[in-house]
Image (spheres, rainbow, N blue to C red):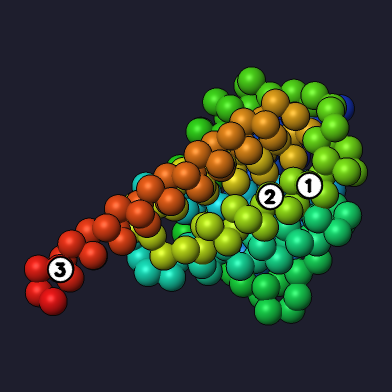
Amino acid sequence: MACSASHTHPGSRARTSELLRGLAQSAPERLSLGAIAETLGDRSFGIVVLCLALPNGLPGPYVPGFSALFAVPIIWMAIDMARGRLRPRLPGMLRRVSFRRRRFVRFVDSAAPWLARIERRLAPHPSWFTRAPGLRCLGLVLVLFGIVLALPVPLGNVPIALGISILAVGLIEEDSRALVLGLVVGTLGCLWILVLVTLGVEAFARFRGYFW
């Protein structure tokens, strides 16, 4: 399985949205995380994280446990990133996690236009965040964001998932501006979940006060 070369110009660096479209076009009936990582080489970390985060960033019905299913491999890879690895080292169980081709194509059809609009504003912008010490710190932040994403909070996953997605795009494009934006959006997502949890606890306390 390989990305279609027809989407890129010779000598140019393919954009993330183009790589995802190429994967969707050439994907077999089921597409595994391991296959994605092997196909995309030095961009595999960012794109695998992006593929795991975006399903939670797209509006849809709340399904208990859905976010945790995607958050666990994000946490695993973020730990590796914090240890200095730049490519995902997925254990066998996670390498075999797969998506139906039809679902992956639908996901790409929804996500690629949104990504393309963002990419028009992105370009490599090296900074401390794109060097080894900064990448390790970003790995630690992604561990925290992944843990927050895994929390079963209705209506709470979209902002944190978008923050993780923007971080992933920043990693792929080596754009420190996107990395900073992802940190800001992810932090706001954490605060949003904190607000929802606080309101939920207060509502439960009031409800319990009526009956006990």
Please, what secondary structure does the residue beneath circle 1 have?
Answer: helix
Please, what secondary structure does the residue beneath circle 2 have?
Answer: helix
Q: Residues within 10 Å of mark 3 (few under 14, many from 20)?
A: few
User: What residue is pinned by disc 2?
Assistant: 141
Along the polypeptide, which appears first: circle 1 or circle 3? 1
**Residues at discs 1 and 2 in contact (Cβ within 8 Å):** yes
User: What residue is pinned by disc 3?
Assistant: 209
**Circle 2: residue type:** Val
Say which quarter of the image contains residue 98. Answer: bottom right
User: What residue is pinned by disc 1?
Assistant: 137
Give the x, y percent position of residue 161.
Answer: 52, 48
Say which quarter of the image contains residue 71. Answer: bottom right
Give the x, y percent position of residue 14.
Answer: 75, 34
Return the residue nearer the eye: 122 or 78.
78
Residue beneath the point at 56% across and 42% down:
186
Q: Residues within 10 Å of mark 2 (few under 14, many from 20)?
A: many
**Circle 1: residue type:** Cys
